[in-house]
Image (cartoon, helix red, strand yellow):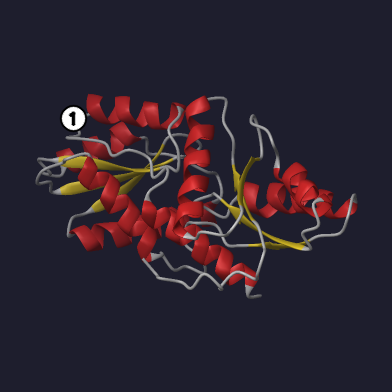
Amino acid sequence: MSGAPASALAAGDPVVLVAHGSRDPRAAEATRALARAVCAARPGVAVSASWLDHTAPGPTEVLRSLAAAGHPRAVLVPLLLTAAYHRRVDVPEAVAAARESGPPIDVRVSDVLGPADGVVDGALLAGLRRRLAEAEPGRFDALVLAAAGTRDPRARGSVGRVAAALGAELGVPCRVSYASAAPPGVAAAVSRLRAAGARRVVVSAYFLAPGLFHDAVLAGARAAGAVTVSGPLTDAPELADLVLRRADAASAT
């Protein structure tokens, strides 16, 4: 944990978390749980949850409400693990819409929670290790990092950097798999490692929340002979710490 001072965010600046959104109610509850964890980690900072799709309120609505309540500034933290389409298009559009109507508000948007400028944050790795340990994998000799998936090659590159860093920390080979949009799937990744001689393969879930993708990874990994699959990051304390440091950095710009 970073131990960042409570004054790092400008006084009174609220933090708005914006998640992708899902039809699965478990995903929205995971975002709310993370918002509570961020509040607990930095008492006195107002934290709101919002979603780009499927769940209300959206970030534009939250920002307009904050402006109407008299807040001149807010910091928006995208709860995304890659800087793909949602970070490059959806988030800026939501912020622009909030600025175009209602009272003015200065919105600072942070980096995503995945690698920023090519750097994998240690808190992200610590959160993944925490969830893997909670899955009680025992001794293992290979690892698959299972991500949601994207067609954006830069975003896939950032997932690869996380896999390389996590494998290095754990001292085992780590391969990437995707639940959608790009190969290989988790079953193929596990099978390839087993064919290469790995006897105990575990899967680290590179997800912020439970849902259909995590369910599919769980089923595919088990069918391919994986020892265990970790749970999503949800409200891991390391993730709350990372959210705050992303907010601090954006507030300071």
Q: Is residue 246 visible?
A: yes
Q: Name the quadrant of the C terminus.
A: bottom right
* Between 98 and 69, the one nearer to me in the picture: 69
Q: For the residue carrying disc 1, how many other residues have a C-alpha within 10 Å: few (<14), some (14-19), or many (20+)? A: some
Q: Is residue 122 left or right of residue 4?
A: left
Residue at 57 percent across and 30 percent down: it is 22
Residue 172 in the image: x percent, y percent? Answer: 18, 55
Of helix, strand and loop, which one carries label 1?
loop
The residue wearing badge 1 is 225
Q: Is residue 12 left or right of residue 185?
A: right
Residue type of the residue flagged with mark 1? Gly
215 over 49 or under it: above or below: above
58 over 161 or under it: above or below: above
137 over 91 or under it: above or below: above
Q: Is residue 90 left or right of residue 204?
A: right
Q: Name the quadrant of the N terminus.
A: bottom left
Residue 184 in the image: x percent, y percent? Answer: 37, 39
Residue 159 in the image: x percent, y percent? Answer: 42, 53
